[in-house]
Image (cartoon, helix red, strand yellow):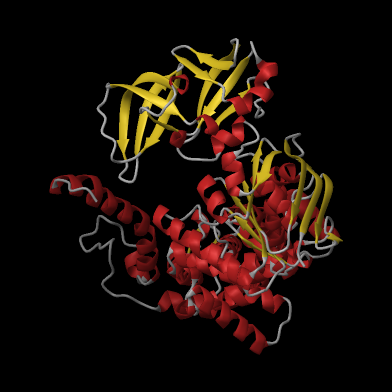
């Protein structure tokens, strides 16, 4: 059993900077949890506190049932993979991987078996005699992972392990890490600023900003029902479109209004938006919830605009335009043929619109 | 490299380079020639028809022989070697630990301490030898090798500390953090991971310290009085300049022999030396 429990965790630096604020997390056994957020959001600091590399200002961290606040890193039974790999430059690949076991006084034969086994899993058997400087980025990455897995720790910690790799290799290593996790069934906590990595790797994803946890959830849950405007904008690429609107009341329903845009609030949402009538709000629409209007689309869910930039990506086309005073992107099928500056009518999928409070930015 | 016109390369590169090389190496050449020049040629004026100031026609080993037989030169060489080695060792041990502490451990006043150590390095020896002489006398160390072995580190430790602090700062912190997660204590991580990685820096500090002690003059002149306890720089100057007579041949032979060990040390470690001063760890 290796759950990790974080209770009211805070980190204040000497200069007064409050990096991590009241973080509460319950990481399940064998779970792959990803901490994601922009730089300076406190995700790495949180991870380093779990590792024991950073002092805890207040709160508790438990690994299994034990409070580890005051344990040195070596006694926490964790392994960590660093962004710059942190391979020992003067040691061979074999010795890099064996070091943790040697420090723990494992018998030589056992070390040998474990290192060879890990090297086999990662496909680096042929590199064991080399020095780190003779390896490519991807190989170094594998050695760093290998060094972590030989110890059979209770928890893996990853600090942006893929961000020094080129884009193609990153995608490949992402899949390998996922596969490795399935195979090893060890609790893993993974820090990244890349939301795609977060979504593909995480069983659950924690979105952080300015030291606060914004939302914890499964990837599709974050995508489908973001808790606030920040999460909505951070998860997904291209990002969700936001339009500042005013909620207006008519006899029968509520309308979201902005210059050149008037959308009827779907009946399912009316209940929760009623209190906002007459006030400002933010309308959020994902690019794929927009399409060119056809006969089936109700006029109260459409608007007119003209496209100014077309990005044909092959598997999809991104159409850029302005509506309601805000720049917007629509993701449409590659078979769609449109020309720049053509006047078009777009429709939005009424079940996939989001509303956010204009002040608190929380989802309504 | 960009393609340039040929004359430009000559004008901006080869010619200045040649001037520089001649300028730096000529004194060594002059020293070597003088060491092997017979006295007859040495005291001949340049106006004489057969003067050959830049080379010698009858090289002789007479000065070398004189140096080794009539003076305590071998003894001086041994003294200098011993003193330089011991003071370098003391300084390296202290400098390595101090440099590591200043680079890595966060403690109140660590920055002030770093600056303070550097400032002590700036105090000129020509002032420092006065109070030091007092201390040496009080501790009854005068005229023993310990007088130099213990006073040289006063200049060398600040230097080594400063150089190594800079070097340790270039080593990624993660190496150490990883070692500590892997099961090493802070001390273990320092000794097993950081020191081996810092070898180029430690070697450069060592070479520099060794050279400084080898060439040191003032302390050696003040604290040592017996001829057989002197170091090479002091011995050569004090024993081979008698009154207003300069034994040029033997002086230069002494200088030549005295610079050989330093040159050897440099040539062995020159590659480490460069990376040590530029401070780079390629992972």
Question: x and y percent of residue B243 in the render?
Answer: 55, 59
> Nearest the camera: B125 or B177?
B177
> Nearest the camera: A328 or A9?
A328
> Nearest the camera: B170 or A289?
A289
Question: x and y percent of residue B89 in the render?
Answer: 67, 68
The quadrant in which residue B230 appears is: bottom right
Q: Is residue A250 left or right of residue A101?
A: left
Q: Residue at x 69, y 47 (%)?
A: A45
Q: Residue at x 69, y 43 (%)?
A: B115
The quadrant in which residue B238 appears is: bottom right
Q: A173 above or below A355?
A: below
Q: A266 above or below A183?
A: above
Q: B209 above or below A98?
A: above
Q: Is residue B225 visible?
A: no
The number of callouts visible is 0
Question: x and y percent of residue B132 in the render?
Answer: 76, 53
Q: Is residue B189 left or right of residue B8?
A: right
């Amino acid at each position: 059993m290796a759950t990790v429990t974080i209770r009211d965790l805070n980190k204040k630096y000497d200069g007064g900077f409050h990096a991590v604020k009241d973080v509460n997390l319950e990481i399940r056994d064998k779970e792959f949890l990803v901490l994601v957020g922009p730089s300076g959001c406190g995700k790495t600091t949180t991870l380093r506190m779990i590792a024991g590399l950073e002092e805890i200002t207040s709160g508790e961290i438990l690994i299994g049932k034990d409070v580890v606040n005051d344990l040195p890193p070596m006694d926490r039974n964790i392994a960590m993979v660093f962004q710059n790999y942190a391979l020992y430059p003067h040691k061979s690949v074999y010795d890099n991987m064996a070091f943790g076991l040697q420090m723990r006084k494992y018998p030589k034969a056992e070390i040998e078996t474990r290192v060879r086994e890990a090297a086999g899993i990662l496909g680096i058997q042929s590199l064991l005699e080399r020095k780190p400087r003779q390896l490519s980025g991807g190989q170094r990455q594998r050695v760093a992972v290998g060094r972590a897995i030989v110890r059979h720790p209770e928890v893996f910690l990853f600090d942006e392990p893929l961000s020094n790799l080129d884009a193609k290799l990153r995608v490949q290593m992402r899949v390998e890490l996922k596969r490795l996790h399935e195979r090893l069934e060890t609790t893993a906590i993974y820090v990244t600023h890349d939301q795609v990595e977060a979504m593909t790797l995480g069983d659950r994803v924690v979105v952080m900003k300015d030291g606060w946890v914004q939302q914890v959830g499964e990837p599709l849950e974050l995508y489908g029902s973001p808790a606030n405007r920040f999460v909505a904008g951070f998860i997904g690429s291209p990002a969700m479109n936001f339009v500042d609107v005013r909620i207006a009341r008519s006899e029968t329903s509520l309308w979201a209004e902005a210059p050149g845009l008037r959308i009827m609030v779907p009946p399912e949402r009316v209940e929760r938006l009623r209190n906002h009538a007459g006030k400002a709000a933010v309308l959020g629409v994902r690019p794929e919830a927009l399409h060119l209007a056809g006969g089936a689309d109700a006029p109260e869910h459409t608007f007119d605009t003209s496209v100014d930039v077309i990005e044909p990506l092959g598997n999809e086309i991104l159409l850029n335009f302005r509506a309601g005073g805000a720049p917007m992107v629509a993701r449409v099928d590659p078979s769609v043929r449109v020309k720049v500056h053509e006047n078009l009518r777009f429709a939005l999928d009424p079940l996939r619109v989001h509303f956010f409070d204009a002040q608190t930015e929380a989802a309504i | 490299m960009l393609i340039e016109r040929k004359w430009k390369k000559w004008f901006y590169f080869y010619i200045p380079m040649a001037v520089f090389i001649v300028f730096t190496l000529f004194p060594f050449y002059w020293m070597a020639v003088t060491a092997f020049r017979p006295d007859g040629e040495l005291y001949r004026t340049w106006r004489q028809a057969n003067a050959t100031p830049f080379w010698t026609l009858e090289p002789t080993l007479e000065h070398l022989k004189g140096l080794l037989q009539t003076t305590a030169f071998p003894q001086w060489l041994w003294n200098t070697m011993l003193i330089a080695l011991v003071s370098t060792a003391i300084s390296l041990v202290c400098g390595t630990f101090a440099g590591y502490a200043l680079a890595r451990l966060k403690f109140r006043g660590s920055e002030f301490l770093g600056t303070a150590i550097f400032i002590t390095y700036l105090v000129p020896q020509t002032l420092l030898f006065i109070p030091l002489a007092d201390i040496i006398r009080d501790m009854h160390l005068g005229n023993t090798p310990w007088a130099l072995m213990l006073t040289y580190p006063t200049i060398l430790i600040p230097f080594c500390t400063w150089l190594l602090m800079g070097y340790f700062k270039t080593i990624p912190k993660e190496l150490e953090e990883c070692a500590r997660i892997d099961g090493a204590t802070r001390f273990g991580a320092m000794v097993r991971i950081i020191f081996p990685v810092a070898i180029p820096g430690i070697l450069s500090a060592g070479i520099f310290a060794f050279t400084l002690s080898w060439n040191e003059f003032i302390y050696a002149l003040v604290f040592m009085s017996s001829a057989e306890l002197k170091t090479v720089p002091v011995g050569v100057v004090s024993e081979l300049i008698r009154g207003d007579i300069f034994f040029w041949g033997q002086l230069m032979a002494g200088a030549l022999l005295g610079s050989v060990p330093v040159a050897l040390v440099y040539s062995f470690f020159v590659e480490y030396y460069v990376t040590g001063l530029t401070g780079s760890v390629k992972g």
